Amino acid sequence: MKKKKKAKKTGKAPKKPLKAKKAQKKAVKKTAKPAKRAKQTEFKTVYISLGSNVGDREEYIEQAITLLRETPGIKVIRRSSNFETQPQGRKNQPLFINAAVEISTNYSPQDLLLLLQGFEDTLGRDRSIEWGPRTIDMDILLYANELISEDSLTVPHPLMHERLFVLEPLKEIAPNVVHPILERTIKELYNDKKAEGITSEKYDEELPGFREVKRGIADDYERW
Ligand code: ADP
Ligand code: MG
């Protein structure tokens, strides 16, 4: 009885030990707080990529989109079809379903990232293996024409132009949107990448596109 009362008081389940990534995320959450929503009132067009390769993958994609739809301050404008793709990075894992969505939001980029990470947690994302299987991954690809280079957030996503599994769904909903650094449309980036005939990524090497992005705006880009 006593225990129950205590649980009620805090309104939380007893704490489990935090994994390193979670602890890091918590720290990010804390530092991001001062930048809270007050700053941003204008609605911006944002593109988000979705990926899942665990369990009912389509269902996780649907749930992620539903969570976005149900969030005040976010309007889901359009979504791509689902694409089944080979895993990159760590190959020995199930195939992915990838999709992209266009939203209009008055969330700041940092708050949006925290929101998406919260959704990932809600949908059971396990962060213990880097580039490992995941119920859902939600990345910010483009945030209007903004260039962001922070420890926890880089926009445009620095690998988006290297990833067919990102460009293919994105091209379906935003073919004529221009990448603000590379100054090419999504369709052009997709065609370029497709022409290369490379379907796999090399995470362990410095990508040429990476260097281009680096020259473009910042020299503190990191691989993640
Ligand atoms: P990945 O998406 O590369 O598989 P995670 O989803 O675990 O890996 O993300 C790792 C980190 O990437 C996050 O902690 C987040 O702070 C950082 N990050 C930087 N830029 C972005 C972005 N544009 N969208 C999503 N996450 C980003
Ligand atoms: Mg991610």
Image (cartoon, grey):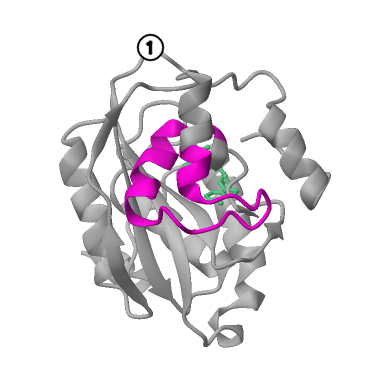
Relative to residue 19, is residue 14 drawn left or right? left
197 above or below 19? above
158 above or below 79? above
Q: What x and y, as percent, mark residue 21?
A: 55, 40
Q: Which residue: 56% across, 83% down?
A: 40
61 above or below 102? above
Relative to residue 4, is residue 138 drawn left or right? right
Q: Secondary structure at mark 1?
A: loop
Residue under numbered circle 1: 92
Q: Nearer the viewer, residue 64 or 35?
A: 64
Q: Which residue: 59% across, 18% down?
A: 202
Q: Which residue: 43% across, 40% down?
A: 166
Q: From the image, which quarter does the C terminus lie in?
A: top right
Q: Nearer the viewer, residue 27 or 144?
A: 144
Magenta residue check for 176: yes
Q: Tell which quarter ligand 1 is in.
A: top right
Q: What x and y, as percent, mark residue 179?
A: 58, 54
Magenta residue check for 154: no
Q: What x and y, as percent, mark residue 112?
A: 48, 65
Residue 75 in sight in this render: yes
Residue 220 in sight in this render: no
Magenta segment boundaries in residue numbering: 162-190
181 above or below 16? below
The amino acid type of the residue labelled 1 equals Asn
User: In the image as oriented, which residue stretches furthest toward the top?
Assistant: 92
Q: Is mark 1 within 8 Å of ligand 1?
A: no
Quadrant of the rendered structure where residue 126 is? top left
